[in-house]
């Protein structure tokens, strides 16, 4: 990927995570609608954006496996 493409992607991600509407991001960066949509879905931007508004406790509650459970499997080996 060209350096300018990487910069556009980083800019689009930063704008998206700040809550800027996709239409506005497209206007500001010149990125194709399909490209922005692909980045959002394939790279987990939507999930990342959702985490930004969560407290640490809320994030850890979303994790299905506890640290204690993981440690228990280490001693089984």
Image (cartoon, helix red, strand yellow):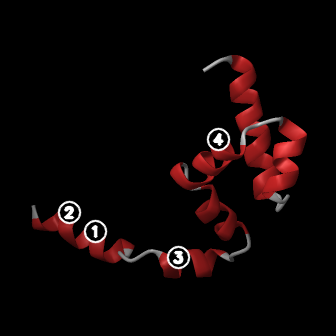
Disc marking residue 33: none
- Spot occupied by residue 50 in the image (x, y as percentages of width and height): 66, 70
Q: Secondary structure at mark 2?
A: helix
In the image, taking residue 13 as reference, residue 37 lies left or right, namely left
How many angstroms separate mark 3 from mark 2 (CA)? 21 Å
How many angstroms separate mark 3 from mark 1 (CA)? 16 Å
N-term-proximal mark, 2 vs 4: 4
**Between marks 3 and 4 in the image, the one whose residue lies nearer the viewer:** 4
How many angstroms separate mark 1 from mark 2 (CA)? 5 Å
> 75 above or below 63?
above
Q: Badge 4: few (under 14), some or many (20 or more) residues near its Cα, within 10 Å?
A: few
The foreground one among 33 and 40 is 33
Q: Are marks 1 and 2 in contact (CB under 8 Å)?
A: yes
Q: Which residue is mark 3?
A: 60
How many angstroms separate mark 2 from mark 4 (CA)? 42 Å
Q: Are marks 3 and 2 in contact (CB under 8 Å)?
A: no
Instruction: Give the mark count.
Output: 4
- Spot occupied by residue 3 in the image (x, y as percentages of width and height): 70, 18
In the image, taking residue 23 as reference, residue 61 lies left or right, namely left
Name, please, the residue furthest toward the top: 2
How many angstroms separate mark 1 from mark 4 (CA)? 41 Å
Q: Are marks 3 and 1 in contact (CB under 8 Å)?
A: no
Q: Which residue is mark 1?
A: 71
How many angstroms separate mark 3 from mark 4 (CA)? 31 Å
N-term-proximal mark, 3 vs 4: 4
N-term-proximal mark, 1 vs 4: 4
Q: Residue at x 63, y 62 (%)?
A: 46
Q: Which residue is mark 4?
A: 35
**Between marks 3 and 1 in the image, the one whose residue lies nearer the viewer:** 3
Name, please, the residue furthest toward the left: 77
Disc marking residue 74: 2
> 19 above or below 64?
above
């Amino acid at each position: 990927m060209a350096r300018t493409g990487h910069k556009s992607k980083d800019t689009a991600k930063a704008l998206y995570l700040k809550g800027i509407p996709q239409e506005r991001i497209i206007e500001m960066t010149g990125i194709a609608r399909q490209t922005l949509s692909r980045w959002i879905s394939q790279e987990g931007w939507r999930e990342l954006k959702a985490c930004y508004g969560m407290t640490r406790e809320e994030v850890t509650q979303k994790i299905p496996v506890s640290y204690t459970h993981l440690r228990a499997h280490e001693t089984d080996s």
